[in-house]
Every structure is written in C-alpha cells, then in structure tokens.
Amino acid sequence: MMDSSAGDPPTGGVPEAISSWISPLTQRYQHLLDKATPHVLRRWLGFAAVAIIYAIRVWFAEGFYIVSYALGIYVLNIFIAFLSPQVDPEIHDALDADGGAVLPTRSSDEFRPFVRRLPEFKFWYSITKAFCIAFVATFFTIFDVPVFWPILLFYWVMLCTVTMKRQIRHMIKYRYLPFSFGKQHYRRTSPSSSEDATLPTE
C-alpha cells in the first residue's frame, strides 16, 4: 500500500532553515545588548573606539566625504532628539486645559524627572550603528563621490550652529536641563508643611 504522504511537497524548506539559523543569533545579540545596558562608561568608550577607527579610515582613504556628511547630519538629528523632552512643551501648552505643564517651570511646581524623547541607550546604539554602517560604506567605491569637502564641512558647521542655537533657546524658554549631575536626594520636613512633604537637596 502506497503512503499518501510520500509525494507531498516538503513544508518550510530553505526559508524555515534560514529562520532557525538566524533566530538564535538574534537572541544572542539581544542578550549582549541587555547585558551592556548598565555599563554606560564602557559603552561610550567602545563608541569612541569605533569613531576613531572610522576617522582613521576616512583620513587614509582621502575620500568618502559624502558618507561622512550624511553621518554628521544623522548624528545631529538624533542628538537633538536626545536633548529634547519626550513631550514638547510648545505642543503641550496648546492643550494645557486638562493637565498642567509637563516640565516644571516654577520652584513651587512638583518635581518631575526629565524624560528624553530618545533615551540614552537608544542614542548610543543608534550612533554606534551609524558609524559602523558608515565604516562599511567606505569599502564601496560607489559612495566615494568627488566633492569639495571644505564646503560640506562649512555647511554642516552652520547647520549644527543654527540647530543647537534653536535648541538652547527652547531649553531656556521652558527652563529645563537635559543633563543631571549627581543623585537627587529628598529630606522630610516638619508635618506642618503638608504641601511640601519632600524637598530636593543637593
């Protein structure tokens, strides 16, 4: 008696084999990222090493200025996202009828920690990945477009100056600082001052 399943086409095949091979690598990669999360200094030292290697590569290649310019624009954009609050106060002010300010603007306001639009880990991961991609791109001559690099550098510096000036004005207007130095401590006050049960101290 013939087995009816003998002539059936195999299910899965090559895509399933590739998926089963990639899945453990993806899990291992994510595990390494999770372990690196608390090691802030080591992560940024690793990024510094990657950036130096990229700079040396471009220096000796004497080209790939378009790649470097695109990298600079991308880094500027994500850096602005790193400095910006998660909710833009300008947008929130227009809808302020329901819930008060997102960022405290007076000393009497309730203390709220600064929440970034782009968290520190994602900022580090994005900028490191961008430098790695740019480094790989320097090995393909198609990206080595002949340009007059001082013009690109001048334009990037001007763009960076205008963008940072606008960001600093935004920070001054809404009175927030995207960096914190030291650990915030709280001390209890007397029970009579029920309005300010805890006050921040340096």
Image (cartoon, rainbow, N blue to C red):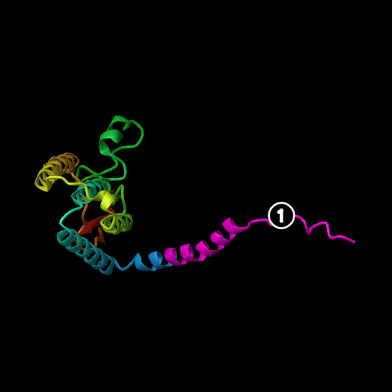
Q: Residues within 10 Å of mark 1 (few under 14, many from 20)?
A: few
Q: Quadrant of residue 48?
A: bottom left
Name the residue nearer the viewer: 138 or 105. Answer: 138
Q: Quadrant of the C terminus?
A: bottom left
Q: Is residue 128 above or below residue 116?
A: below
| Magenta range | 1-30
Q: How many marks?
A: 1
Q: Quadrant of residue 20?
A: bottom right
Q: Residue at x 21, y 42 (%)?
A: 105
Q: Judge whether residue 74 can be spotted in this image.
A: yes
Name the residue nearer the viewer: 2 or 69. Answer: 2
Which three-letter amino acid code belongs to the residue tagged 1? Pro
Residue 138 % position (x, y): 25, 56
Residue 36 painted magenta: no
- Please indicate whether residue 116 sits to the left or right of residue 52 in the image: right
Q: Residue at x 20, y 49 (%)?
A: 72
Residue 127 % position (x, y): 28, 55
Q: Residue at x 17, y 46 (%)?
A: 146
Q: Quadrant of residue 122?
A: bottom left
Q: Residue at x 23, y 47 (%)?
A: 70
Residue 14 % position (x, y): 59, 58
Q: Is residue 167 above or below residue 201?
A: above
Q: Quadrant of the N terminus?
A: bottom right
Q: Residue beneath label 1, please?
A: 9
Name the residue nearer the viewer: 138 or 187. Answer: 138
